[in-house]
Image: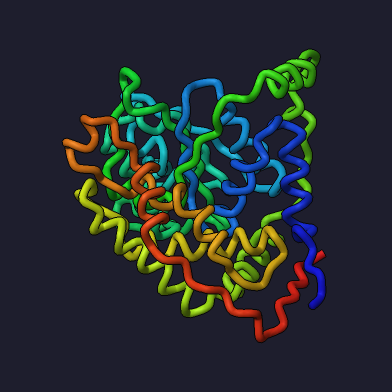
């Protein structure tokens, strides 16, 4: 069997470029890129100062996407995000909001009111904005990367379930090790690397890569495995509301993107297991008793993965070579 490359040229360029800015964050960068390749939106939840905003900026620059940032605050209005019609020269004219870009950073999204948070629902789900009865189509590719502080922080609002479900993945950047932090200090002593970061891809390449990701093969046994995982999340005794069909689609899509990152033309159970915490964690609504006793969605996902039998992988019967665009 032909040896496959560990990564496509496209993804290798992106990951190497982002690593110039993000020290020791290869794992979360790969998952975030997998989410973008799968056509989804990313929610980064972590304490302040862990590099959430920098990861979004580095990915936008590396992919050659237009980038706009909105600081979500309690007084932010929906029109501040989507745009508004203004009266000029005897007629109403639509002035696009910052959502009309390639990658929108919704910074500290859970500090805004639920009404403003919901302003992103149509844009994230349908790729369009409706204002005064007129529909305005967003440019493609369009990605929302939102950051939020843990919900226990003062002045935050819990995102509605419908809003959370629009995010393909919820990821945590995490603190660096002492060695990584020392390396970061050395890099940032004179200037920040993001100031000199250049694009190593363009939106057309991203669109083509997304098409290749959708072509990654998923065996019927693995589709059954994905369905069993989401079904078990709904039946778990500590879960009031588990993953729905959108969660299954997200799990399949991210698994395909992870296979693409590894240069494989087929999904493996390991891809599904790696994708599951980020895909399912934010979609699980736990019973009150479970939350009060300190149960976390991630631990429930781990239990689900341990309980659902993993399909036995057969030897590939088709050509598994993958030739990504150089």
Residue farthest along the top direction in this orientation: 189
Q: Could you tell me which residue is drawn at 75 percent across and 75 percent down?
A: 321
- Visible in this render: residue 291? yes
Q: For this view, does 142 lie left or right of residue 188?
A: left
Q: Position of residue 8 (x, y in %)?
A: 76, 60
Q: Position of residue 108 (x, y in %)?
A: 43, 29
Q: Position of residue 258 (x, y in %)?
A: 61, 58
Q: Could you tell me which residue is drawn at 55 percent across and 21 percent down?
A: 49
Q: Position of residue 142 (x, y in %)?
A: 54, 53
Specify the quadrant that holds the C terminus.
bottom right
Q: For this view, does 155 lie left or right of residue 214?
A: left
Q: Is residue 73 above or below residue 122?
A: above
Q: Could you tell me which residue is drawn at 52 percent across and 73 percent down?
A: 312
Q: Nearer the viewer, residue 284 or 81?
A: 284
Q: For this view, does 188 lie left or right of residue 240?
A: right
Q: Is residue 242 above or below residue 114?
A: below
């Amino acid at each position: 069997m032909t040896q496959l490359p560990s990564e496509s040229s496209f993804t290798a360029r992106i990951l190497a470029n982002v690593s110039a800015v993000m020290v020791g964050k290869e794992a979360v960068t790969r998952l975030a890129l997998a989410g973008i390749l799968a056509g989804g939106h990313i929610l980064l939840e972590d304490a302040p100062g862990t590099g959430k905003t920098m990861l979004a900026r580095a990915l936008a620059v590396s992919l050659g996407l237009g980038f706009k940032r909105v600081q979500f605050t309690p007084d932010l209005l929906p029109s501040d995000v989507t745009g508004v019609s203004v009266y000029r020269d005897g007629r109403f004219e639509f002035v696009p909001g910052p959502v009309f870009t390639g990658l929108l950073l919704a910074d500290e999204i859970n500090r805004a009111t639920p009404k403003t948070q919901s302003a992103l629902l149509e844009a994230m789900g349908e790729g369009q904005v409706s204002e005064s009865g007129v529909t305005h189509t967003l440019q493609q590719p369009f990605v929302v990367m939102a950051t939020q502080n843990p919900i226990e922080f003062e002045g935050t609002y819990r995102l509605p379930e419908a809003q959370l479900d629009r995010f393909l993945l919820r990821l945590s950047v995490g603190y660096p090790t002492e060695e990584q932090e020392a390396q970061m200090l050395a890099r940032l002593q004179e200037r920040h690397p993001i100031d000199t970061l250049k694009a190593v891809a363009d939106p057309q390449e991203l669109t083509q890569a997304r098409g290749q990701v959708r072509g990654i093969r998923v065996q019927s046994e693995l589709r059954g495995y994905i369905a069993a995982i989401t079904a078990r999340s709904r039946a778990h005794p500590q879960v009031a509301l588990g993953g729905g069909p959108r969660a299954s689609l997200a799990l399949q899509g991210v698994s395909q993107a992870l296979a693409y990152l590894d240069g494989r033309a087929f999904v493996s159970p390991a891809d599904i297991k790696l994708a599951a915490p980020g895909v399912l964690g934010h979609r699980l609504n736990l019973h009150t008793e479970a939350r009060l006793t300190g149960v976390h969605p991630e631990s429930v996902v781990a239990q689900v993965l341990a309980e659902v039998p993993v399909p036995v992988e057969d030897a590939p019967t088709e050509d598994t070579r993958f030739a990504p665009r150089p």
